[in-house]
Amino acid sequence: MKTLRRQSILVIVAMAVVTVGVGSLFVSDAHSIKSLKGRIIAVGIPGASAISPVGHFLPGGPIHDNPAFAAYTLPGRILDPARILVGSRSNFGAPRANSEQRDGSFLSINPATDEVLVIHGNFAAAGDQASTLEGHVQLYSAQSPAFINGNNNPSAVTAGFTGVSNPLGLSINNAFGRLWPANAPDGLRGIGTSTILDPSGLPLAGAPNPQAGGVFAGDLTPRLPAQVQYGALNRGAVGTAFLGRSPDGSRRAVFSVVLADGSIVQVHTAQAVDGLAPAGTVRPLFGRRWDDDDEDSRRTSPRLGVILNYTPTRTLYISEPFNDSIVALDLIDDGQVFRVGAVRRFHCEALDQPVDLAPAAIETEDPDWSSNTTLEEGADFYVANRGNNTIVRMRQDGTVVAVRRIRLADGRSLGNGRLNGIAVSPDGSRIWVTVTGHLAGERNGAGAVLELPAFGQ
């Protein structure tokens, strides 16, 4: 008890230092926040949520080394490294696979177009990896029969699930694996799913865990014969990040998944689901909603951001939108699973509904760590504030480096639009954000993607 009490006191002291230091830095500059002008890439993405660059898949991984998979990464194809993936709550006309679960999809978008991409709401009605706007927009995966787990894994207990349904998170294992969405198919109070997708948009073929195939869901896919730590995907999955290779020596990938009740699970490609942290570790999202004027925003499920620092300490940074804070969880392991060590929390006036996080510099070269959700060693990170449409650049100790208010290219505000996701290009030069609601002056549909220049001081 004395040891636990002493650790708690140290954590509280550390939090106080961060809060005072960060808060005072921001207050002194609050009156002179600079603007950052964004170019509209696409509109017509209802509930635009998680966003990520595709990036390069490294040698030694299946998408690089398998010729059939590598074909998807060629210029103009769905996983062309220069493209971005964007989550939506829409099927874009594709038929539902499960009538009782929510629609949802990931789009593959070419961000290098000169004209704004106006996406038609039914372009994917054929139900496959449909394409529109001369290939600049393609459907990667959706809550549609073409993408059911059972197509590749008919004996899985989750054979009837799809890889995407109301997607709220995306982490890509560019190092040695595949793409992992996090979904809330029944809303935040329902179960969550964590899925592994092939380039085809299907849950992976030849899955190392036949019980799950490519879809881990609810309490259906625990580690067998017994869990090391109790945990299940019993609430909607609201964020996810790659944790690297398992500490058990198998060299399999493990991902963290944050649930709407504030718990966190760890998902092992072969061993399935164990717990990582109990409910309430992160401020819960279920029972909360975006209180916005725009219908698209009100209908969009709340989400949060998750990123990982892997050295010298493995630390998860998780945003807490309704607490105006970021929690930092140091991870340890026992040679089999990950466990939570020290917990810190950053509060400051620069945070206003921090909905998502992105590394200012992504780890792109390490064959064990490369991912859109992995910070390069010592890198800062960006925080997307939904409440006031600002982006904060922050150091890993919680110090605010700079704040920018997001505006359109002509200087106008975003109108009813609200930031909902953030990603950074692999070279660190560009920021992409998703926006829910209708942008000022845009009548071509709700939900959008903007491109902005990266910034330092």
Image (tube, rainbow, N blue to C red):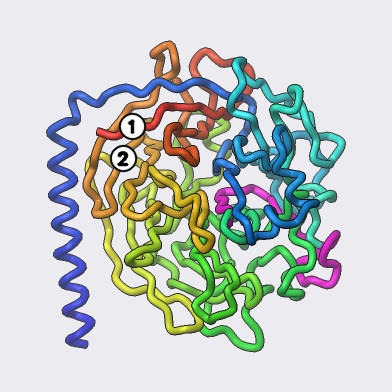
Contact (CB < 8 A) between labels 1 and 2? yes
First reached walking from the N terminus: tag 1 or tag 2: 2
Query: Is label 2 in a helix, a strand or a loop?
Result: strand
List x then y, in percent, for residue 275.
51, 75
Residue at image mark 2: 393
Bounds of the magenta segment: 150-173
Residue 183 in sight from this viewpoint: no
| Label 2 neighbour load within 10 Å: few <14, some 14-19, many 20+ | many
Element on which disc 1 rests:
loop
Residue in the picture at 22% in, 87% down: 1
Q: Main secondary structure of the magenta part?
A: loop
Q: Amino acid at mark 2?
A: Arg
Tag shown at residue 455: 1
Image vertical order of residue 273 relative to residue 98, above or below = below
Q: Position of residue 117 (x, y in %)?
A: 64, 21
368 and 208: which is toward the camera: 368
- Inspect this view and state whether residue 363 appears: yes
Task: Answer few, some or many: residues within 10 Å of disc 1's Cα (few below 14, many 20 plus, some between 14 and 19).
Answer: some
Q: With respect to residue 12, does 366 lie above or below? A: above
